Amino acid sequence: MSEAEILAMRIGLTGLIISVVSVSFGMISAYIAGLWLFLKRAPRALRTLAFVLLSIGLVFMAVLTWGLHALLIGTDQAWARLGTNSTGILSFGGERPEYLFGLSLYEFGAGLGAVAFGAIYLTLAYLTFFYRWPDMDKLT
């Protein structure tokens, strides 16, 4: 592969990853709105169905991301085989600055994303099944 082909593929993959993250946040935002407006008063079966559907959607996005991960690693390997390039870019996020304690920028970003989505998912599970929403009619 040429340098231009690798860069074009990498830019395309970056766009796909941004789309996956955007769709995931859209799903989560829609779920939060549904939880606040409807699901907080819904029977447990309906809340369970909604949460399962959210979970399936997020698992689909995770599997898609894992597939993109393999392609990203492939572009890294192809870039490394070039030897020299005209851009002067050594790698795509493979740098390991001291302040990340040995992690590469790519590994740190992936870990941060996983922790963030995990925390959001657990919070939504808590709000769906355990949190007792105040009766807003009594507060006004």
Image (cartoon, rainbow, N blue to C red):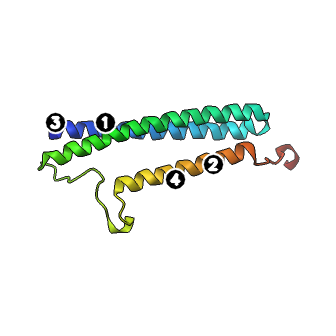
The amino acid type, in three-letter code, at marker 1 is Gly
The answer to whether marks 3 and 1 mark residues whose Cβ atoms lie closer than 8 Å is no
* Observer-nearest of 37 and 103: 103
Q: Residues within 10 Å of mark 4 (few under 14, many from 20)?
A: few
Q: Is residue 63 left or right of residue 86?
A: right
Point out which mark residue 115 bears.
Answer: 4
Residue 46 position by quadrant: top right
Q: Earlier in the sequence, mark 1 or mark 4?
A: 1
Q: Residues within 10 Å of mark 1 (few under 14, many from 20)?
A: few
Badge 1 element: helix
Residue at image mark 1: 12
Give the alpha-carbon distance from disc 3 to disc 4, as whole Å: 35 Å
Q: Nearer the viewer, mark 1 or mark 4?
A: 4
Q: Residue at (19%, 48%) from the top-left corner? A: 80
Residue at image mark 2: 122
Q: Earlier in the sequence, mark 3 or mark 2?
A: 3
